[in-house]
Amino acid sequence: MSLFPSIFKNSSSPIVTKLPSSPNPAPREESKLEEIQAKAREIILEAKDEALKIKDQAIKDVEKRLGEIKDQSLVLAEKQKQLVQEREKVDLEKDQLSKEVEKINTQKNQLETESESLKTKLEKLAGMSQEEARQLLLNQVRKDSQAQMAKIIKDVQDEAKETAEDKARQIIVDSMQLGATDYVAEYTISTVELQSEDIKAKVIGKDGRNIKAFENKSGVDIDMDETPGIIRLSCFDSVRREIARVALVHLIKDGRIQPARIEEYLAKARQDINRIIFQEGEKLCHAVGVYTLPHDLISYLGKFKFRTSYGQNMISHTLEETRIGMKLASETKADLDTVRLACLLHDIGKVVDEAEGSHVELGVKLLKKYNLPSKVVDCVAQHHEDEPFTSVESVLVYIADAISGARPGARNENYDEYIKRISSLESIAKSYPEVDEVYAIQAGRELRIIVNNTKASDDRCIVLAGEIKNKIQDSLTYPGNVKIIVIRETRTVEIAK
């Protein structure tokens, strides 16, 4: 390859150089030209040598690469041969496995056939089907399991009975220890002591005008004849009696006893007692941790201060019973707030004077009026077992009330007076000729009268109930209300033969 084609065409031919025409070329330029031509020849020779070296190296590289490719081809051929052998081996094993599967399936079918044959023979021998045999076996297992379960349950129950009585006794004792032992029972006072008998004349007044005015305005009867130095106030309403007592005490201290003063002091005493009632109700609520009751309910509870039941002050009883109930609820994991509120309000019907009915009925109506929780209302309705218990909390309120009432010294009940009152109620009703039978029930709070239907008409029954009511009010003193029920019944009986 020519490196300088523009200078010369063939390295072996003489070099012909066209020099610029000059009339007289300088010898120096000719020498320089020869030098250039000599270098050119050297360059060409070096280039040829380098080209030969490159060609030889390329040939060697190609031969080496061909050798490597040949070696790799041999290795690949060997691997391919091995793969062919492995594939033949796998195909052979696959054929063997297929034969084994066929053999196993054949044996399985034979076993199934033999199993069905054996089942058929077994059913013939046992005289029952497979399903019947299975059911029989399950029933036997269930029977054995039930017997075992019953034994376990009985053992657990026996163990519980052994420990339950001791545990219950301990809980009740702990609860009773929280009774209101530090609260002094406060009984209603219905007498006023006089410094001298002359004061009685002032209280009576001229022509009895003072005592008549006092009785009319206060609704309380005054008795001065029984005990010297004492004026007795008689009225079933304990709050009204206390208002009259306070007013009379202030009138006696003032000394100016006259109708105008009587009315003034009664009004002032009424305000003072109402304030005391609310304070006592609030104090009772706070003592057991109740702070959100309506104002009117707090006032009803405050009336407990002037109310006793079987000689037991109702604030004392309520405080004691609520603390017992709270302790029982805490020990039994019951709803503490429900028990607390139900115990506090369980006897609130005893101070409701606006309607007739038992204290349970009146209490339930009052609590429903103020939208108290239904669980609390149920506890109040059931605390004397008038209704079946619907919750654990109802049972606890009943137990707490029974513990407080049954505690030695808690109540002072005059059984002679009780029997006398029941007998008097029945005697009043029996005094009428139309009456056949009389039953005083609910501790004398209800009088059921059965009349002869031939002697009394329906209209007469209405009049009779009113007459008996008036006679009881005029002649007897009794706690609470007495409901009079007159029953007139006509029966016609026929027998078909």
Image (tube, grey):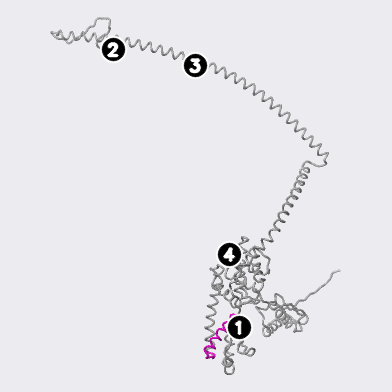
- Element carrying mark 1: loop
Label 1 sits on what residue type?
Ser
Residue 30: image x %, image y %?
18, 8
Q: Which residue is mark 3?
A: 72
Which one is earlier in the sequence, the residue at label 2 or at label 4? 2
In front: label 1 or label 4: 1
Which one is earlier in the sequence, the residue at label 3 or at label 4? 3
Label 3 sits on what residue type?
Gln
- Element carrying mark 3: helix
Relative to 421, 38 lies left or right: left
Find the distance from the CA under tag 2 to the CA under tag 4: 117 Å
In front: label 2 or label 3: 3
Can I make out residue 378 in this image? no
Which one is earlier in the sequence, the residue at label 3 or at label 1? 3
Asked if the magenta segment contains residue 118, the reply would be no
Q: Which residue is mark 2?
A: 3
Q: Which residue is mark 1?
A: 190
Q: Which mark is residue 337?
A: 4
